[in-house]
Each structure stands twice: as structure tokens, then as C-alpha cells.
Image (cartoon, coloured by chain):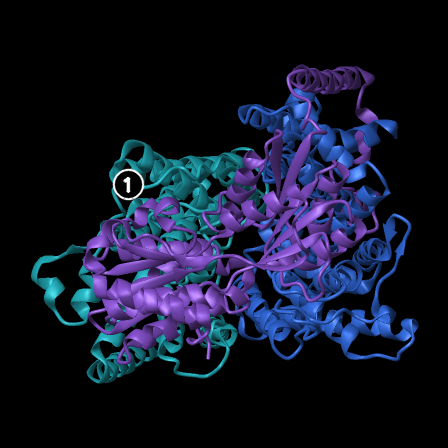
């Protein structure tokens, strides 16, 4: 047993070490000190309660975004639309969060989350439904919907839902009511707990329910699933709706728990990072959690790294790419460690692409 | 995950393991049992060796540096989501901070943090506070709230907020504001006089950022002020805030579209997007371009063949001046208005006639005394 | 297969083209300069998308998904710009851009074909790494003193009203792209290489049994296709813009994917899709320039994306777009 645990952690562990090693070379090339840089990175992400809070806050939308990609993968679809779904979730949650007052928290907060979730479900479901009914490729549609969502949410926050208090000139909504604000328990944001719960739920649904079985069957072989009586169109539409909902919840938590409002431009790229997370986790809903924590830690510590060591924060992008590469190409690490070949580790998400 | 053995019985242990495997590898049951300890030993050893190499490298490299030297008079600058070499306002503010530090008689140091995500504004300011910075410059209206909060929490630290309007004055926070419409108006006035086709174009960042809107309105009104027959064609980047200032390809293509329909002077205002427009105009014989924020002669050398002037906000001057005041203890809280104006004409000095210069001087005077309103 | 059209589809296509020409003629008579400007902008915006789409389609035709085009554009643009500014030669810069594209193509092949890394992961690695590396090593002191590529008039052709400006007064890499469209079309559908390429994308097992080295051909194709994306990067830095700035590819690598699928993985189809997309972009600019509609730019800016979704959905109803059968699956020699 301990052997298999060792084998389970060995590859990601070594991948991280190799990523950091190569990163150290880059740091040296900039005449900076790797140990100072990495110490700062670690302290910035884990050094005190505030740092831990930031790491968990950053990991939260990554978990949701990773799930949004992983869930769609299970049905053989590639959801590139996490960014748009996240924005829609963020703006609608904020809309309900500031637009209604006088409700108790037990109603208001779930309502705001629900508004975001529904927005995302529609945004994702649209792509799935179009795919199921007209054959429009979900990759095209979700890319286009990202752009549309960006413009739509920018406009909402700059016009009808704009914060007109003071002399505000920023494109942003008013602050959400306290009754719609997601609280923080010490260093642990409740939004993070929601994300962990969502990951566990996804795992349960996919592995332990008939619906999950149908999703996976469609992912394996669409035609075989159809012959066995599964409503493939419904599965594709609903899977993308669930995926959209997950990404949107990430956005909703940002608005209600981190930013306190929706502001144009503050969620840049968050949804795209879900792809990296899902891939690091090899599309496993539970694996999404450690993957998001790792990336969240690096992002939380990046500012401190630049401050203490003068290393540009983009370094963490390069390290992420390296880690992803080493995790995905275990053959290199196996060779380094002289580990045995293991056929169960070879994963093919890309196969989901070519099933229309 | 796509287990290749779809046909296998879903209730079998192996299948469950494959589907439920953690982030990486869970070896199949058979294989784990056949694995020999002999295999494990080298793996352990190699893993350890790798970790040790990593530690050694880190330690070896660590001896040469030790982070920033705290203590002394330090000035911190937090950028908006952008870099200190953005050839635009972050860069201008950083240059001002460096000048400000150099002007302080006792040795002062200036350092910066480049914000990657706007959610980090408060944290990045706090890093400087914790480090004992005496003056903290924050760049861009996006940092407005975070700066106010930090200023309230740290009354001993002086804050300078570039492009941040202060509703209520805090004694230790100066908002450095610029009347962008005036700068745009001056540039437009010159363009109105220089255009031969009577069409002037503007390629802009996004209307979500108020300074961009002020530049545009001022530009159009200025052009009409000196040339009532002028046609102004302007367009904002159609995308979101995330790409509006970083899309030189769109800027260039759009500038070309404006040139193709007769515009002969183009105002590029919007970070890299606007710079793309300037460079495109540079490739068109006879066409002129106008830069923004700083004298873009120095930031976009590719635009030399067309750059007739730039509508400047003297952010560097304003920041340096406020740093001097803050150091001397004379800085007052509230709003501080920086200078705007036109950059030199450089290679095009010859085409700006003395009548034009007189008109510009009169316009400047009118703007200053309020007889001309740049944004009616 | 994409290149085969049903008679109804062909008639629909001709009808559409006729309508289009009539509309263009009406607009041209009404306002020549603006019509020319919009159509010139259309062709210009299409070039980069067409190059990215060709890169993607050669990979996909051979069974390898490439979502790393965005990263290939960006890093190649960086290489092209850096070398051009160092040597003072746009040509050397272009060569460097293509070289970087080939290297990244090779890297993608090494991961996806050699190491059997999941193809989506391999592409994502390229994207993140390119974004990080170019930002990390960006040097603002560099510039292109000699300016970017300028238009070359093709003799009397360039003097034809409208068509001359739109097609025959273009910078060199645009002409090269148009030529490459023809080359890639012929190569994919008329050559032995093309036949083999399509075979390994559809039935790698069968191709193997008739003696085609599947892995080797995929390696070769993905690497060569990277050269097209590399040319795209060079085009971006040295012809379209004339400088480098961070993240300047701005999502166009992903748009190129959409264009490729929309164009049914054929060069001409992709070019038509790219022109369509370029047209909607130029059109929304023109709406803003003319103040045609008094609506916020955010809504005008949605036009290209909304129209694309509608058209993709409609064309999906007309004829399904089938992916190559073995797309995304790494091939294991049996």
C-alpha cells in the first residue's frame, strides 16, 4: 500500500521539483537568487494566516474552473468556455447580491449563488445544446461565447448596474449586501469549502450515479451509448450546463466572497486557468483540489517573490507549464527514478475532441 | 479520463481504480503485488538525490543575494495590472518615482511590484507597508479603493495615487489627477489645422476607462475648434477591458481602415493597442500620428516617421514633485492636478507654422482660463 | 470529408457568392473609399487566422489536435521581432519566426507523438510556456528601426478599383499566405503525402498495415505545420504590427481553431471562414467610425462572435462537420 502511495506522489512531486529547478536556472539568468525567490514565494503563499487565506482564495475559482473542464471531458467534450461562464456567474451573483436588500442571509446568499449558477448553466448549456441539436462544434461556440460574455459583463457593470456612489468612474457594480457576502472562517474562506464540496459532489455524481455512468459512456463512445438507449443529446446539453454552472460558481464566489462586487476586468484569465488545473489533475474531480492549491500557492506568493528577489511574476507561468509537462510525460520521470512502466497512467483527453 | 478498456466490467476492482485514480498514477492491483522491493530502493534513492540536488542548487545560489535591504528611505510603487515597461502610464509613473528618489538628498531607494491580478492590489501595497516604505505610489484608478484603505490604516506612510480622484481628503494621500480632455483638445486643435483631407481618426482603448473617453472627446472637440469642416472618425476597441489595451494588431488594422477612407492624422490612445495604430501610420507616406500619455517619440521609436506630437500627461513630473513634497512634509492630501500638454514636434517641427503655434498658445490660454471648455 | 460538397450545398454557395458580389457592388457605388477600407481590413484580419488554421488542419488531418497555436504565434512573434531588431533584417526575422514555429511544432510532436502525452495537454503546455517566457524575457529597449513590411503593388493589377487595393497591394507575407493556401490545398488533396496524411488521421491502423509509418508522418506533419504558425507569428510582429508586445496574439490562435473547424479543415474553407470573421470585425469598426448606431461599443463588438455562432449552428444544420476519425488519439503500434 505504501508503495502505491509513494508511486502516486512520486511523479507530481518530482515534476514540481524539476519545474522549480528549471525555474531556478531562469532566475539565475536574471541575476537573481533562486533561494531568496522561492523562500519569498513560499512565505507569500503560506507564511501567515493572511497568506494562507490568499492561497485558498486563489485556489477556489481554480477548483471550480478545473471541475468545469474536467466534467465536460468526461462526456467527451472540450469546454474552452470557462472564462465566459465564470464572468456570467460573477456578474449575476453580484447583481442579486447588491440588487436585493432586506433578505436574511440564509436566503439571500444562496439566491445570489443560484443566480450565478443559473447564468453559467445557460451559458454552458447553450454550447452543449447547439452541439447536440445542430452539430455546432462546442470548441467554436464556447470560444465565441467567451468574447460575448466579456463584452456583456463589461457593459452591465459600466451601464445599468454601475456603482454610482461618490464620483465612481470605474466600471463596477455597487458592493454586495452583507447578507449576500460569503464569510471567512479564520484563514479559511467558506467559498473554498464550497469548492471542495463541489469537487466531492462531482466525483460522486460521475462515479456513483446512473447519470454519471451515462456521461462517461457518452464520453467513451457516443454511438455505442446511443445504441444502448442513452439520450446522448440530453447528456451533452446537460453536461455542458453543469460545466458552465461549476465555472460560474467560481465567478460567483469571487464576487460574493473576494471582491465584494463585480468589476470589469478583474477576473481576467481566471476561467482559462481551469484548463491547466483539469489537465494537471488528469480530469479527476478530486485531483483538481491539490492541483488548484499548488497553482494558487504560486500565484499568492508571486508578488512577494518579485518584491524580495526582483523576479518577474511571469516566472510562475513557466514553472506551471513545466510541471504540467512533466506530469503529462511521466516517461521522463520514470526514467529518472527507474520506475516501472505503468499502463494505467497514460491518459488521452484529446480523444474527446474528435467525437462529433 | 478515458480508460481504454470500456468493455471491462464496471464492477471489477481494476476498473474502479482506473476511474477513481488520484491526480496521477494508481497502479493496477496485479502490478503492485508483483513489484519487488528491489525496484523501490533505487527509486527512493533517486528521488532523494533529486531533492538534494535541488537543495544544493538553491543553497549555492542563495549565498549571493539576500533580498531587498530594508531600512533607509524607501519608496514603493505598485503598478496597475501591467508592467513598468509598458511604454505608457505605469512606466511614466515608475520614471517619476525613480526621479523622486534620486532628488531626495539622503539616499533613497525606489522599488516596484508589478500587479498580476487586480485582486492583489491591497496585498501588494501591504508588502511595502510591512517593509517600512515611507512613500507608496499606486498607479491607476483601479487601485483607488485599496489605496484609500491603506492610507487610513497607515497614517505615517505617505501615499500618492495616480489617476485616483479623492472625494474626501486624507492627510497622507494625494490623488494625482490630469485634465486629459485638455491634452486631447490641444492635440485635436493641432490636427484640425494640419489635416489636408479634413478627416482625422482616433484609435482608442476602451470607453470603460474614463481617461480614454476624456482624451477622445477633447481630441474631437479640439479638431472641430480649429477646423469646423473636419470629420472626426473614432473607434474604441470592441473587446473587453482585458484585451482593449494589449491588442496592437487590432490597433494597426483599424488605423489602416481609417487611413484607407481618407484620414490623414490618427490619434492612437490606448497602450499597446494605440501604439499599433501609430506604427501603422508610420508606414503611410504623408500621414501623421499623435501619441498619448508621454512623449511617444521615446517610447515608440517605430513611430518616428509620423509622430507629430503626443497628448501628454506629465505623470513622471507629477509623481516626482509629490514625492519631493511628501519627503519635505509639505504634501497636502486631496487632489493634486498635474500638467498636461503637447510633446515637441521633433522631425515635424517644420510643418507646424508660426500661425499654428500662435493658435495653440491661444487655445492653451483659453483652456487654462476656462474660456474654452474641452468637453462641452 | 470536407472537400466534397453536395450539389445543394454547391448551389447554396454560388447563390451566396452572387448575393455577396451584388451587395459589395451596391455599397461600392454608394461609398467607394469606405467599402474599399472595410474589404481591405477584412483581408488583412484574415491572414493570421488563415495561417493558424492551416497549421491546425495539417495536424488534425494527421490525427493530432493542436490547441497550442496561440502559444506558437506568440513565441514565434517574439523570436521574429527579436532577431529582426538584432540583425536589422526583416527577412532574417521572418526566418527566425518560422524557425521558432518549426521548433515549437517539433516540441508538440515530441510530446504528443513521441512521448504520447495527451494532445490537449501538450498544446496547453505550449500556450502557458509561451506566455510566461515572452513576458519574462521581454526587452523593451528593442525596436524595429527599419519599419515593418510595406505593401508591394502587383503592377497594373493594383490599379484595378477596389480589387486592386484589397488583393493586389499587399505586404509580402500576405501574398505568401495566399500562395500557401493553394500549396496546402494541392498538397492535402492532390498529393501522395496528402493522401497518406488523411489516412493516418482517419485509419491509422489501416495506414500502418499498408506500410505508412504513422508516427513518423505525424512527427513530420506537426513539425511542418508549426512552421505555418511560425510564419503567422512573424506576420504578426513584422508585417501586421511592427513591434512586439506582451500577449499580443490576443486569443487569435484560438480563433484560428474555430476558423479551421468552421472551414471544414480545408485551406479554402478556412480562408473563407477567416474572411468572414475578418469582415464582421472590419464591419463593426466601420459602424463605430461612422457612428452608424448609437449603441455601446460592447454590443457592436459582439457582432463577429454572435454572427459566427449563428452561422456555425446554421451550417451545422445544412451539413455536419465531421472530425477525422482518429483525431486526438495517440497511436500505439499494435
Residue B221 is situated, as x and y percent measured from the top left of the image, at 38, 75
In the displayed structure image, the side of residue A356 where residue C243 appears, left or right: left
Residue C291 falls in image quadrant: bottom left
Crowdedness near tag 1: few (<14), some (14–19) or many (≥20) residues, C-alpha within 10 Å: some
**Residue in the foreground of this view, choosing between B373 and A160:** B373
Q: How many numbered marks does the figure carry?
A: 1
Q: Would you place residue B32 above or below residue C260 in this image?
A: above
Residue C159 is situated, as x and y percent measured from the top left of the image, at 11, 66
Q: Residue at x 40, y 74 (%)?
A: C284
Q: Residue at x 68, y 73 (%)?
A: A163
Visible residue check, residue A9: yes
The chain that hosts pointer 1 is: C
Q: Chain C appears what colour?
A: cyan
Q: Would you place residue B200 above or below residue B69 in this image?
A: below
Q: Which residue is mark 1?
A: C145
**Residue in the foreground of this view, choosing between A166 and A222:** A166
Q: Chain A appears what colour?
A: blue
Residue C257 is situated, as x and y percent measured from the top left of the image, at 46, 57
Q: Secondary structure at mark 1?
A: loop
Q: Would you place residue A272 above or below residue C302 in this image?
A: above
In the image as oriented, which residue stretches furthest toward the left? C156
Q: Residue at x 37, y 36 (%)?
A: C82
Residue A30 falls in image quadrant: top right
Q: Residue at x 8, y 58 (%)?
A: C155
In the displayed structure image, the side of residue C218 where residue A4 appears, left or right: right
Visible residue check, residue A70: no
Residue B273 falls in image quadrant: bottom left
Residue B34 is situated, as x and y percent measured from the top left of the image, at 80, 25
Instruction: Output the letter for the chain in purple.
Output: B
Amino acid at each position: 500500500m505504501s508503495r502505491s502511495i509513494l508511486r502516486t506522489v512520486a511523479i507530481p512531486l518530482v515534476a514540481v521539483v524539476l519545474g522549480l529547478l528549471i525555474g531556478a536556472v531562469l532566475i539565475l539568468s536574471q541575476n537573481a537568487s533562486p533561494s531568496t525567490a522561492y523562500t519569498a514565494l513560499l512565505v507569500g503563499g503560506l507564511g501567515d494566516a493572511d497568506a494562507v487565506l490568499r492561497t485558498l482564495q486563489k485556489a477556489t475559482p481554480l477548483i471550480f474552473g478545473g471541475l468545469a473542464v474536467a466534467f465536460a471531458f468526461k462526456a467527451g467534450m472540450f469546454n474552452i468556455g470557462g472564462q465566459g461562464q465564470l464572468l456570467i456567474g460573477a456578474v449575476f451573483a453580484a447583481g442579486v447580491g447588491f440588487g436585493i436588500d432586506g433578505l436574511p442571509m440564509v436566503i439571500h446568499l444562496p439566491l445570489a449563488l443560484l443566480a450565478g449558477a443559473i447564468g453559467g448553466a445557460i451559458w454552458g448549456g447553450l454550447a452543449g445544446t447547439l452541439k447536440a441539436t445542430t452539430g455546432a462544434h462546442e470548441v467554436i461556440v464556447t470560444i465565441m461565447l467567451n468574447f460575448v460574455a466579456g463584452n456583456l459583463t463589461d457593459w452591465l457593470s459600466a451601464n445599468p448596474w454601475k456603482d454610482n456612489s461618490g464620483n465612481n468612474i470605474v466600471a463596477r457594480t455597487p458592493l454586495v449586501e452583507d447578507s449576500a457576502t460569503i464569510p471567512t472562517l479564520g484563514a479559511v474562506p467558506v467559498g473554498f469549502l464550497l469548492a471542495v464540496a463541489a469537487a466531492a459532489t462531482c466525483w460522486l455524481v460521475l462515479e456513483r450515479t446512473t447519470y454519471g455512468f451515462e456521461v462517461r459512456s457518452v464520453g467513451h463512445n457516443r454511438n455505442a451509448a446511443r445504441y444502448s438507449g442513452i439520450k446522448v443529446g440530453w447528456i451533452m446539453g446537460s453536461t455542458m450546463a453543469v460545466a458552465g454552472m461549476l465555472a460560474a460558481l467560481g465567478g460567483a464566489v469571487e464576487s460574493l466572497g473576494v471582491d465584494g462586487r463585480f468589476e470589469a476586468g478583474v477576473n481576467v484569465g481566471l476561467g482559462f486557468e481551469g484548463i491547466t488545473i483539469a489537465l494537471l489533475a488528469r480530469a479527476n474531480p478530486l485531483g483538481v483540489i491539490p492541483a488548484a492549491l499548488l497553482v494558487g500557492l504560486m500565484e499568492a506568493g508571486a508578488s512577494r517573490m518579485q518584491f524580495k528577489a526582483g523576479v518577474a511574476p511571469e516566472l510562475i507561468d513557466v514553472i506551471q507549464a513545466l510541471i504540467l509537462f512533466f506530469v503529462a510525460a511521466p516517461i521522463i520521470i520514470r526514467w529518472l527514478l527507474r520506475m516501472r512502466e505503468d499502463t494505467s497512467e497514460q491518459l488521452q483527453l484529446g480523444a474527446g475532441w474528435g467525437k462529433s | 479520463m478515458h480508460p481504454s478498456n470500456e468493455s471491462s466490467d464496471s464492477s471489477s476492482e481494476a476498473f474502479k481504480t482506473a476511474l477513481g485514480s488520484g491526480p496521477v498514477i494508481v497502479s493496477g492491483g496485479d502490478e503492485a503485488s508483483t513489484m519487488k522491493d528491489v525496484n523501490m530502493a533505487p527509486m527512493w534513492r533517486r528521488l532523494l538525490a533529486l531533492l538534494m540536488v535541488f537543495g544544493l542548487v538553491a543553497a549555492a545560489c542563495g549565498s549571493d543575494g539576500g533580498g531587498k535591504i530594508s531600512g533607509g528611505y524607501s519608496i514603493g510603487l505598485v503598478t496597475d495590472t501591467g508592467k513598468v515597461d509598458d511604454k505608457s502610464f505605469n512606466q511614466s509613473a515608475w520614471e517619476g518615482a525613480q526621479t523622486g528618489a534620486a532628488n531626495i538628498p539622503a539616499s533613497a531607494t525606489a522599488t516596484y511590484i508589478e500587479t498580476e491580478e487586480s485582486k492583489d492590489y491591497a496585498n501588494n501595497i501591504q508588502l511595502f507597508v510591512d517593509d517600512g516604505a515611507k512613500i507608496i505610489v499606486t498607479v491607476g484608478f483601479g487601485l483607488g479603493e485599496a489605496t484609500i484603505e491603506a492610507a487610513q490604516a497607515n497614517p505615517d506612510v505617505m501615499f500618492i495615487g495616480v489617476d485616483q480622484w479623492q472625494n474626501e481628503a486624507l492627510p497622507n494621500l494625494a490623488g494625482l489627477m490630469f485634465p486629459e480632455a485638455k491634452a486631447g483638445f490641444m492635440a485635436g486643435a493641432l490636427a484640425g489645422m494640419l489635416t489636408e483631407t479634413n478627416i482625422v481618426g482616433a484609435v482608442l482603448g476602451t470607453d470603460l476607462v474614463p481617461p480614454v473617453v476624456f482624451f477622445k472627446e477633447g481630441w474631437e472637440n479640439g479638431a472641430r475648434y480649429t477646423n469646423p469642416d473636419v470629420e472626426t472618425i473614432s473607434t474604441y476597441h470592441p473587446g473587453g477591458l482585458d484585451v482593449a489595451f494589449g491588442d496592437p494588431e487590432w490597433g494597426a488594422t483599424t488605423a489602416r481602415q481609417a487611413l484607407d477612407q481618407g484620414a490623414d492624422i490618427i490619434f492612437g490612445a490606448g497602450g499597446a493597442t494605440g501604439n499599433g495604430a501609430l506604427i501603422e501610420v508610420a508606414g503611410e507616406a504623408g500621414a501623421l500620428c499623435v501619441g498619448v500619455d508621454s512623449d511617444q517619440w521615446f517610447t515608440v521609436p517605430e513611430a518616428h516617421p509620423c509622430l507629430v506630437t503626443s497628448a501628454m500627461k506629465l505623470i513622471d513630473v507629477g509623481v516626482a514633485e509629490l514625492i519631493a513634497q511628501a519627503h519635505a512634509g509639505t504634501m497636502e492630501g486631496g487632489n493634486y492636478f498635474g500638467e498636461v500638454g503637447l510633446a515637441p514636434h521633433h522631425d515635424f517641427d517644420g510643418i507646424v507654422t508660426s500661425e499654428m503655434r500662435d493658435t495653440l498658445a491661444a487655445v492653451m490660454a483659453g483652456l487654462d482660463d476656462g474660456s474654452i471648455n474641452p468637453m462641452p | 470529408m470536407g472537400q466534397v460538397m453536395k450539389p445543394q450545398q454547391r448551389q447554396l454557395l454560388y447563390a451566396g457568392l452572387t448575393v455577396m458580389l451584388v451587395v459589395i457592388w451596391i455599397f461600392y457605388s454608394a461609398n467607394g473609399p469606405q467599402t474599399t477600407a472595410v474589404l481591405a481590413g477584412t483581408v488583412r484580419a484574415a491572414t493570421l487566422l488563415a495561417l493558424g488554421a492551416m497549421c491546425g488542419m495539417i495536424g488534425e488531418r494527421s490525427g493530432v489536435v493542436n490547441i497550442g497555436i496561440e502559444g506558437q504565434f506568440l513565441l514565434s512573434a517574439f523570436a521574429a521581432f527579436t532577431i529582426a531588431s538584432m540583425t536589422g533584417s526583416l527577412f532574417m526575422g521572418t526566418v527566425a519566426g518560422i524557425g521558432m514555429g518549426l521548433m515549437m511544432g517539433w516540441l508538440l510532436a515530441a510530446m504528443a507523438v513521441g512521448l504520447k502525452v495527451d494532445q490537449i495537454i501538450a498544446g496547453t503546455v505550449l500556450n502557458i510556456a509561451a506566455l510566461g517566457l515572452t513576458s519574462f524575457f521581454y526587452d523593451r529597449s528593442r525596436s524595429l528601426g527599419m519599419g515593418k513590411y510595406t505593401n508591394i503593388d502587383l503592377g497594373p493589377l493594383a490599379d484595378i478599383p477596389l480589387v486592386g487595393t484589397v488583393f493586389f497591394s499587399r505586404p509580402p507575407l500576405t501574398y505568401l499566405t495566399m500562395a500557401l493556401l493553394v500549396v496546402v490545398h494541392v498538397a492535402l488533396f492532390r498529393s501522395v503525402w496528402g493522401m497518406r496524411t488523411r489516412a493516418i488521421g482517419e485509419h491509422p491502423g489501416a495506414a500502418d498495415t499498408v506500410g505508412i509509418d504513422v508516427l513518423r508522418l505525424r512527427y513530420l506533419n506537426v513539425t511542418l505545420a508549426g512552421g505555418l504558425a511560425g510564419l503567422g507569428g512573424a506576420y504578426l510582429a513584422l508585417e501586421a504590427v511592427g513591434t512586439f508586445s506582451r500577449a499580443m496574439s490576443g486569443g487569435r490562435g484560438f480563433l484560428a481553431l474555430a476558423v479551421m473547424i468552421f472551414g471544414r479543415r480545408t485551406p479554402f474553407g478556412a480562408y473563407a471562414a477567416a474572411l468572414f470573421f475578418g469582415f464582421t470585425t472590419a464591419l463593426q469598426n466601420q459602424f463605430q467610425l461612422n457612428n452608424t448606431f448609437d449603441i455601446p461599443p460592447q454590443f457592436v463588438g459582439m457582432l463577429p462572435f454572435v454572427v459566427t455562432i449563428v452561422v456555425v449552428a446554421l451550417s451545422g444544420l445544412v451539413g455536419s462537420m465531421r472530425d477525422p476519425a482518429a483525431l486526438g488519439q495517440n497511436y500505439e503500434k499494435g
